[in-house]
Amino acid sequence: MMGTDVMSVQIDQQLTYEAYSYYVQGLFELLDGLSLSAQVFVDLDKQNEFRIPAAVREVSGVVDAYFFNLINLFPANSSYSSQAANQKSQVDTHFRQAVHAFHLVTAQSATPYSNVTSEAVTME
């Protein structure tokens, strides 16, 4: 897609955006299912706490690059461009939540991402 001209035909923009939206919806469902199943995956193999989030991060990078290239096909001033960028942001959030779900399964406290400072550690 790199080096591809910006789409100027409205119907092409619409069809591309619809396909993009379906892909985004599929990612939402996949990542939500993965997040909800984190406990099961970790119970099956304790190493999944690390393996699956690593794989999710790899896929996230590929999807990120793909989305940037796809978004660049839309004219910058079109509503499709801003809507696609908004959806990309939502996908990024779902990827982060999927990664966090696996870490939360084995967390030692209810809020492992809260302020991690300790009373024993003081700044002088």
Image: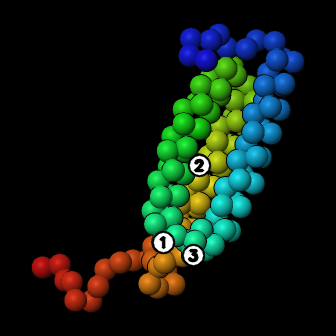
| Residue found 52% across the figure and 58% down from its top | 52
| Residue found 46% across the figure and 85% down from its top | 109
Among numbered discs 1 and 2, the one appearing first in the sequence = 1
From the viewer's perspective, tell me whether residue 27 is left or right of residue 124: right
For residue 103, say whether it is visible: no
| Residue found 27% across the figure and 89% down from its top | 119
Q: Nearer the viewer, residue 64 or 72?
A: 64
Q: CA distance from mark 1 to mark 2?
A: 26 Å
The label shown at residue 92 is 2
Q: Nearer the viewer, residue 39 or 21?
A: 39
Q: Nearer the viewer, residue 89 or 79?
A: 89
The label shown at residue 79 is none
From the viewer's perspective, tell me whether residue 68 is left or right of residue 20: left
Among numbered discs 3 and 2, the one appearing first in the sequence = 3
Task: Please identify the quadrant where the C terminus is shown.
Answer: bottom left
Q: CA distance from mark 3 to mark 2?
A: 26 Å
Task: Please identify the quadrant where the N terminus is shown.
Answer: top right
Element class at badge 2: helix
67 up-or-down from 101: above or below: above
- Which amino acid, mark 1? Lys
**What residue did someone put label 3 on?**
43
Residue 85 in picture, x, y percent from top left: 65, 37
**What residue did someone put label 1 on?**
46
35 up-or-down from 65: above or below: below
